[in-house]
Image (cartoon, rainbow, N blue to C red):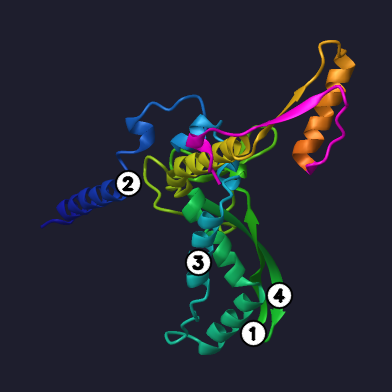
Amino acid sequence: MSKKNKKQQNDTQSKRNLQLAKEVATRNVAEYITGLDYLPNPDTILQKNGGNIKVYREMIDAHLDAVKNKRFASITSRAWTIDGSKGDENKAKFVEEYLWNIDLRNTISQMLEAIGFGYAVHEIVWNAVATDLGVLILPTAIKDRKQEWFKFDADGKLLLQTKDGTREELPDRKFIVTRNRPTAINPYGTSVYSRCFWPLAFKKGGLKFWMIFVEKYGMPKAIGKCPPTATIDEQQTFLKMLTGLIRDAVAVIPQTGSVELLEAGAATANPH
């Protein structure tokens, strides 16, 4: 084979390799992107609530919190170490001790919030640190950031949502994004709380209506009777007295008035 033919063959192979390394079926090619420079979170619960992930933060429930804490504790309590068998063991030991000093377990616990919310974001603060190994650029803090501050673009890249409504690209090696089963459709990750939202809403709603039912039918109703000549002010005063009777079981009733306790029917006589 001549040098020319060999060169042409190499060029053809190089082009094929470049084609294989390049993404072809991307979102920008296959889909029409609206005027937004980011992808809205496709979570249906958030979409029905204005897209604010704060909805999940307000999902306070003792059982849900207990299950979450149990899962988090089982993970953060596991032992971990930096493996230095393939390199410098002294450096590995130093990194392990250093990560302990910046409270890595708490950071791991914060990252696990991605299970409920779909994603979690942390910012790394880097600084020059004098060590026995010399001056090194090390993370001096790993800070938890609110999910509301960030969006994802069509390529799944993290963007910072600024207070003036614009979105900024973020520097490399500055942010850690933890996501729960992200997909091409949903780069925000799968939120477990979206599965808990309606069962928890019905649970809270049912408890609320049950308490109203108990208050309505669990105690006798105090009915006050005023003489026909009672004025509006006298009736209002009498109503306040009845309110005190229900709250404190003590009231001063005018001699011209009377109080009757109306018991609930047999069907609802024992709601407690």
Say few, some or many: other residues with alpha carbon within 10 Å of mark 1 (under 14 / 14 to 19 / 20 or more): few
Q: Are marks 2 and 1 in contact (CB under 8 Å)?
A: no
Distance from the alpha carbon under mark 3 to that under mark 4: 36 Å
Disc 3: which residue: 70
The three-letter code of the residue at mark 3 reads: Lys
The residue located at (31%, 50%) in the rendering is: 21
Residue 235 visible in the shown view: yes
Depth check, front residue: 134 or 63:
63
* Residue 129 locus on image (x, y percent): 71, 75
The residue located at (58%, 71%) in the rendering is: 105
Q: Helix, strand or loop at disc 1?
A: loop
Disc 4: which residue: 129
Quadrant location of the N terminus in the rendered image: bottom left
State whether residue 81 is above or below residue 183: below
Q: Which residues are magenta?
A: 248-272
Disc 2: which residue: 22
Disc 1: which residue: 133
Say few, some or many: other residues with alpha carbon within 10 Å of mark 4 (under 14 / 14 to 19 / 20 or more): few
Pointer 1 or 3: first along the chain:
3
Pointer 2 or 1: first along the chain:
2
The residue located at (53%, 83%) in the rendering is: 92
